Image: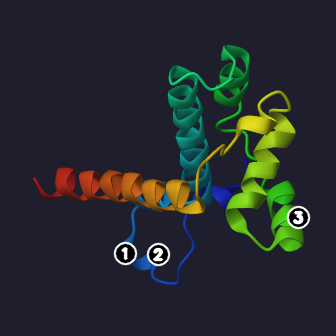
Amino acid sequence: MSDNYEHYDNPLLTRYASAQMSRIWGPQRKFSTWRRLWVALAEAEAELGLPITAEQIEQMRQHVEDIDFAAAERYERRLRHDVMAHVHAYGDVCPKARPIIHLGATSCYVTDNADLILMREGLTLVARRLV
């Protein structure tokens, strides 16, 4: 994995953020969190009776961390939509799950919930260091 995607990039980062905090806000963590949310969505939809197989969900689980950032960037240039770019890139590595990734969701389902999860992780880190 390239370090470019592991850590958050900001001019203030090198002065004030720890390596752990920069990883929390880095692209790898952000987009793998999106993928974990898509897995949770598929599990819930399957539980509710949608035609989603255990095999599709397992394939999604197996590829939560292996993000092809170059593919996502190519899709984003073409689609001009960050979430749909990552839906397509995830579908490339999960071909059986492609039809059910992001099924019935809005972009805000992944962006807003991922931001909240990352905020919680960041604040947990801050709280541990304050005590």
Percent coordinates x, y for residue 72 in the rendering? 80, 58
Percent coordinates x, y for residue 39 in the rendering? 58, 34
Res 68 visible: no
Q: Which element type, helix, strand or loop, lies under badge 2?
A: helix
Identify the image's colour scheme: rainbow, by chain, secondary structure or one colour.
rainbow
Residue type highlighted by circle 2? Leu
Percent coordinates x, y for residue 8 in the rendering? 54, 66
- Asked if marks 3 and 1 touch (Cβ < 8 Å), the reply is no
Residue occupying image coordinates x 59% and y 50%: 105
Q: Which element type, helix, strand or loop, lies under badge 1?
A: helix
Disc nearer the start of the sequence (3/1): 1
- For label 2, the crowd category at 10 Å Cα-Cα, with few meaning under 14, some 14 to 19 and many 20 or more, is some
In front: label 3 or label 1: 3
Query: Residue 80: which quarter of the image?
Result: bottom right
Estimate the spatial distance between the alpha carbons at disc 2 and disc 1, rounded to whole Å. Answer: 5 Å
Q: Mark number for residue 74?
A: 3
Disc nearer the start of the sequence (3/2): 2
Residue occupying image coordinates x 52% and y 84%: 11
- Against 7, is 124 above or below? above
- Asked if marks 2 and 1 touch (Cβ < 8 Å), the reply is yes
Residue type highlighted by circle 3? Arg
Q: Which element type, helix, strand or loop, lies under badge 3?
A: helix
Percent coordinates x, y for residue 61 in the rendering? 64, 27
Give the residue pinned by disc 2. Answer: 13
